[in-house]
Image (spheres, helix red, strand yellow):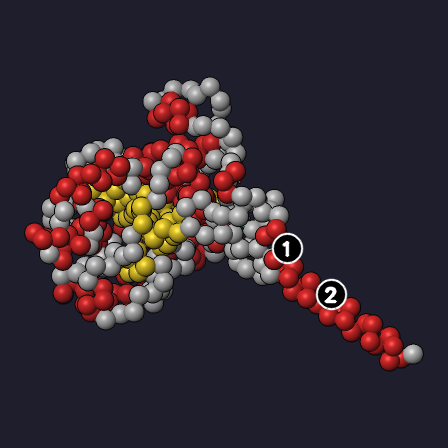
């Protein structure tokens, strides 16, 4: 009798066990995903005309469905006003307590007077951390360096979209005269020199530097200009970094788990990893106004991708934005625009100083 029960229970338990595993890893969920070909995301419908109207300060036929009306706790004074030929603004997503990272960035890649002939500015984006000591330090930094943008929301991973939109809002309302904006995390190494060389000819980077006369293909560049525009065209809509096409993660234990209710499709819209990316002014404008017609999403890289998708801007891929830490040796960083993995600010400054001495930063 005993043996008989055991025999029946064992396969049954095994069956339950397997199913639990499959559930946890989200295998069943994938069967219920919808095809990305059928992709739509609220607001339903074409929003290009609404974007155009908002840019002209006119009222669109359909009222916005999404508002980020930020209260700024701290904002820099006269950061960008009256600067002629402002080329690049670093908008650095930082955590309130990461004082050392900010100090390191100010004296290395974020140094505003790095090049005498190129206007560069830098701000740090912060939320609220809740500690008075931390806040007092931030107030002091803001006074000393005039580079803090702080929003009145809790600083946390799942509020990263808020932080990004705080940056968009600040840029549109207080610094809309720059040609390019680089959004980057405070644990990155960046070569400002390579950012500038990249935005000059994104479609030819870095080949045009390797052998300027031989490899720089003027005809090819001219052809691509029509799609990507670039320097000759003020209206370039550049959304660039390390671009991905991937699928949502459905296992419950993942930091990036999403339910079907939150996002039902089998693919994400094409996106650029949010650790480091560059937007031209025109892309920033269109994507900012697209946010009024794009339902909130808590992952910032996906939300930014949704904005680009709605504004019909295709991401432009560049290998030199490394979302992992690129192995360090001198030659390996010659063309690197940005590399993740530098939460140790001393290491970052060491690498930057080394690269600068080689003429690569
Ligand atoms: C931020 O400011 C708004 C408007 O003053 C307020 O309603 C909201 O509660 C504030 N949020 C936090 C987290 O302080
Ligand atoms: C995001 O910030 C808001 C406002 O401070 C807060 O109420 C909310 O809990 C935060 N969300 C997360 C996921 O931390």
Q: Residue furthest left?
A: 213
Asked whether mark 1 and ligand 2 are closer than 8 Å, the reply comes as no
Secondary structure of the residue carrying tag 2 is helix
Residue 16: give its label: 2
* In the rendered image, the vertical position of residue 59 relative to residue 354, given as above or below: above
Q: Residue at x 49, y 48 (%)?
A: 267
Q: Position of residue 171 (x, y in %)?
A: 32, 38
Q: Is residue 340 left or right of residue 39?
A: left
- Label 2: how many Cα within 10 Å (few below 14, some 14–19, many 20+): few
Q: Position of residue 49 (x, y in %)?
A: 40, 24
Q: Residue at x 27, y 70 (%)?
A: 328
Q: Quadrant of the C terminus?
A: bottom left
Q: Nearer the viewer, residue 192 or 205?
A: 205
Q: Position of residue 79 (x, y in %)?
A: 26, 41
Q: Is residue 321 left or right of residue 35?
A: left
Can residue 91 be seen here? The reply is: no
Which quadrant of the structure image shows residue 353?
bottom left
Which quadrant of the structure image shows residue 192?
bottom left
Q: Residue at x 21, y 59 (%)?
A: 335
Can residue 244 be seen here? The reply is: yes
Q: Which residue is mark 1?
A: 28
Secondary structure of the residue carrying tag 1 is helix
- Label 1: how many Cα within 10 Å (few below 14, some 14–19, many 20+): some
Q: Residue furthest bottom?
A: 3
């Amino acid at each position: 009798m005993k043996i008989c029960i055991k025999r029946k229970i064992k396969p049954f338990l095994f069956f339950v066990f397997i199913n639990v595993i499959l559930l946890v890893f989200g295998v069943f969920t994938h069967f219920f995903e919808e095809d990305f070909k059928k992709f739509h995301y609220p607001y339903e419908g074409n929003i290009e005309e609404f974007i155009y109207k908002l840019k002209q300060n006119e009222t669109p036929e359909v009222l916005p469905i999404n508002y980020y009306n930020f209260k700024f706790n701290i904002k820099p004074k006269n950061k960008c006003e009256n600067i002629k030929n402002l080329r690049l603004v670093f908008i650095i997503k930082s955590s309130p307590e990461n004082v050392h990272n900010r100090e390191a960035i100010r004296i290395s890649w974020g140094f505003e007077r790095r090049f005498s002939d190129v206007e560069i500015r830098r701000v740090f984006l912060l939320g609220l951390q809740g500690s008075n000591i931390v806040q007092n330090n931030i107030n002091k930094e803001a006074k000393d360096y005039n580079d803090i943008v702080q929003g009145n929301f809790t600083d946390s991973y799942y509020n990263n979209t808020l932080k990004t939109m705080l940056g968009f809002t600040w840029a549109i309302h207080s610094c809309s005269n720059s040609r390019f904006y680089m959004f980057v995390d405070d644990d990155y190494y960046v070569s400002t020199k390579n950012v500038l060389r990249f935005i000059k000819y994104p479609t030819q980077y870095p080949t045009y530097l390797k052998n300027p006369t031989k490899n720089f293909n003027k005809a090819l560049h001219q052809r691509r200009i029509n799609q990507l525009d670039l320097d000759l065209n003020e209206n370039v809509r550049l959304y660039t970094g390390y671009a991905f096409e991937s699928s949502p993660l459905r296992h419950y234990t993942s930091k990036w788990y999403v339910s079907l209710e939150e996002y039902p499709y089998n693919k994400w819209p094409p996106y650029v990893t949010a650790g480091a990316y560059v937007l031209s002014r025109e892309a920033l404008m269109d994507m900012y106004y697209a946010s009024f017609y794009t339902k909130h999403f808590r992952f910032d890289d996906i939300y930014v991708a949704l904005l680009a998708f709605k504004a019909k801007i295709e991401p432009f891929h560049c290998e030199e934005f490394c979302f992992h830490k690129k192995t360090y040796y001198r030659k390996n960083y010659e063309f690197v625009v940005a590399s993740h993995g530098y939460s140790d600010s001393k290491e970052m400054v060491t690498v930057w100083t080394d690269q600068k001495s080689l003429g690569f930063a």
